[in-house]
Image: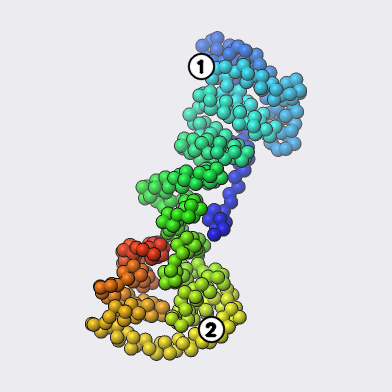
Amino acid sequence: MARKFLISRVALAVALSSGLAVSVAPTAAVAAKKDKGGSADYSKEFVAEFIPIQEADKKARAALNGTPNDETMAAAVAVMNAELGGNAKAAYEKAASVATTPDDKNVLGDFMRFFAIISKDNDLKIKALKMRLDSGKVAADQIGPVNYDLGVTYYQQKDFASAAPYLKAAKDAGYQDPNNQLDLLLADTYKRSGNSEAALAMVKEDIAAAQAAGRAPSESSLRSALQSAYDAKDLAASTEYAAMLAQNYPSPDTWYISSSIVRQLASLPKQQNLDLMRLMYETQAMKDKRDYLEYLENADPRGYPGEALKIMNQGLAKGALASADLGTEKADTEARVKSDKASLPSQEADAAKPGATLATLTNAGDVFLSYDENAKAETFYARALEKPGVDANTVALRLGIAQARQGKFAEAEATLAKVGGASKPVAELWSAYAASKS
């Protein structure tokens, strides 16, 4: 299945991360603050190298004129180079070599980040941000933003393995970026670094937290979890998240996504796939010719002509099918429907008898379900479940379908919860449909 169905590509290039509003470092009198008992502790050698940088920084910011763009940033870089002997980066490197105290490193990292942004030097920006974090002097409310900034910069460098721990640290610090992209970015980073297990664990935590709080998990978390499970070809997890996605965010699109994933991973037997196609029809999730032809193949106009004719008519009405796709099959199916419907009263009478066999009851349930006579189908399936030798999973699934179609959503959920075996993935989706309606 194409990845585009699950996670729409968000714009992950975050403009200047937390922007150009870097904090203003101590004034030129940093050494005096140290001597007068101030809280900051700057080394003498560092102060000597830093004061020219600080002065150049002021002039560079003025050159931006409050409007950072390619032109003003280039002008700001030119100012800094001119003020620092023609090579501002070299001045920063020299200051870094004598930055020995935590305060030295924190303030230099802050200023260095600004220069790295205006000079578009991501390697220098990474060095600056790491210098700040390593200093241990970053304010508590800035731990998240600084880690996020560093993670995003590594991401832009396509160093996903290095990006992940910093993005995770930002998340753990409770930070959320203005565009609410952190979770998606972290999940994508895990995937791109080959750590699909961490991506899945992350969204599982978010989903569990939402459920514990009594609210629906975010759609992005569910889609991410579903994508990870699908990539891992994990049918059980894929079905779980597919059901949760469609239940909490029901739409033809989410039902298409959820049904298609189960359809691909489960390799369902024909009868179970028919029940899944019935769900796609119920939720208006059928999209193209393939869906309609697959439904017709599963229903088989010779077996369930009434249901097959319904699908043919809808496919033609929606333009998903053309007359040429069906040939003479539509006319043949219409003829079968007439004779098939004529046999329904006797089939119902046989199934209504107290001594009706298991085969009679299940066949009757299947026929009436195919004609959307769901109340009758429910009666016969319920009786069939009491018979020895019954295929309990298949019959319970179809009983649940009949109940859901009648609006008996609570009963349907209870019935579908009992389904196991090959029918279980389909039952979970039908149960999610019932839950979304109730």
Give the residue type that dot 1 points to.
Ser
Disc number at residue 39? 1
Sort mark 1 into few (<14), some (14-19) or many (20+) by Cα contacts within 10 Å.
few
Residue that appears at 45% across and 62% down: 266
Instruction: Please name whichever residue, 335 or 317, is drawn nearer the observer in this view of the structure.
Output: 335
Mark 2 vs mark 1: which is more N-terminal? Answer: 1
Question: Residue 402, can we see it?
Answer: yes
| Residue 348 shown left or right of residue 18 in the figure | left
Residue that appears at 55% across and 32% down: 146
- Quadrant position of residue 369: bottom left
Sort mark 2 into few (<14), some (14-19) or many (20+) by Cα contacts within 10 Å.
some
Give the residue type that dot 2 points to.
Glu
Disc number at residue 285? none
Q: Residue 359 at x, y = what percent?
A: 31, 79
Residue that appears at 44% across and 57% down: 235
Instruction: Please name whichever residue, 279 or 419, is drawn nearer the observer in this view of the structure.
Output: 419
Quadrant containing the N terminus is bottom right
Q: Residue furthest left?
A: 354
Instruction: Please name whichever residue, 65 or 368, is drawn nearer the observer in this view of the structure.
Output: 368
Query: Which residue is denoted by mark 2 in the rendering?
Result: 329
**Residue 6 to residue 329: above or below:** above
